[in-house]
Image: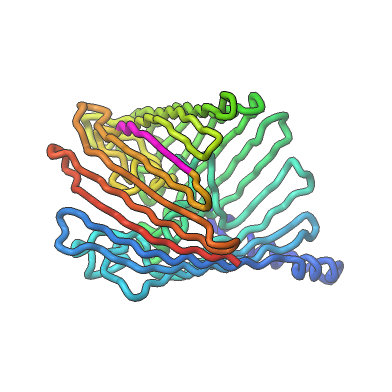
Amino acid sequence: MKRAVSTVAVLGILAATAVAAEDGSELLTAIKSGTVAIEVRARFEQVDQDGFDDDAQATTTRLRLNYKTGQWRNLSGFIEFDHVFNALLTDYDSGAGTSPGKAGQYPVIADPDGSDLNQLYLDYSTDPDWKWRGGRQRILLDNQRFVGGVGWRQNEQTFDAFSLTTTAAKNTTLFYSYIGQVRRIYGQEVAAGHSNVDAHLLNARIKLHENWTLTPYLYYIDDHDALANSTSTAGARIAGNLPLGEAKIEFLGEFATQSDAADAPVSFDADYAHLTVSWTGSRGLSVGLGFESLGGSSDPGEAFRTPLATLHAFNGWADKFLSTPDAGLEDSYAVVKYAHGKWNLDAVMHDFAAKTGGSDYGSELDVSAARKLGERYGLLLKAAFFSADAASSLTDTDKFWVMLTASY
């Protein structure tokens, strides 16, 4: 099954070639009508973390090239290559054994060098309400809290999978995917760079009203390489907004429950909850409050897990909580956003505590400023300042980024 998932796009191309004699002109038209895109993302990152004598500094660049075909016999294809390299500043540990000799000397900046066939898939659709996708693909569900692409890192997380998206039911977008392999950000040369899994993802986005949606979901993961990630998670989220004159109030509420699955080494049950309320005005100002809770226990290995998530977007940009502590996590936060001219300014203040036992982990301030430079270029300035509580085992950590992007 997994080999079929990872090679389905190649088989599809071979099948297309076999029948090309029948309608070669149509196939040639589909190829010629395809589109090519090139992206460049260059980034400087610095990490100052207590416990290390030296700061980590990295200048990394990602080159991305992709091509999407036109339609032929209800089929279309997509292929995408990435190449990540560093230059000038290389004093950092890229993590998971990808930079021998630097582990323990520098803090981690998880952007190893390497080339990657990031995506290769075929789409098939005979009806606007049904679309099948087979091959290596990006899967982004909801806000990516449970399934995402880890898009902040230079090497993206993608999946070898079969997926179905249908809008046949009224006011509902139903998504199902079977995943055979997770291709993680560290690349295929190290064990942490991939996971062989049998995973089933089911997500239904239901439009309740013009401004409100309900999304129930069920995610089952049987991880053959990291048994502790074998979990079954069921939950639902509701999101919407209420007009308030020229402004609006936005709400998000989510709850999920999780238990061990397949050959997980520990039996457990844990809950997840997330609530946010924000106000957005007519002059580019938005303020909000949020609370996120991931369950834990006094026993090790029983905390709520999110092994397929885009983690950097949650619980602080300093990435101190990429895995949930055994005692769980409570994140109380406040957000301020302001759009001024071409600039988008964000600030987030977090307070972290254990879900079980009530101990404090620390606090964090995150700030960013982003703008477009013409139609093709972008600039991002971003920083995170984590201050550990004296009683916790965590360490003070400051991070700073400057990023330039270009798209053609």
Give the residue at x 54% y 55%: 160
Vertical relation: 171 (above or below) 56: above
Residue 399 falls in which quadrant of the image? bottom left
Between residues 196 and 39, which one lies in front from this camera angle?
Answer: 39
Vertical relation: 216 (above or below) 15: above
Residue 302 visible in the current orientation? no
Give the residue at x 44% y 40%: 337
Lateral position of residue 289 relative to residue 139, left or right? left
Counting from the top left corner in percent of width and height, residue 271 is at 37, 27
Counting from the top left corner in percent of width and height, residue 287 is at 43, 33
Judge whether residue 101 is colored magenta: no
Lateral position of residue 166 relative to residue 318, left or right? right
Residue 17 falls in which quadrant of the image? bottom right
Give the residue at x 51% y 60%: 378
* Magenta stretch, overall SS: strand
Residues in magenta, as a range: 330-338
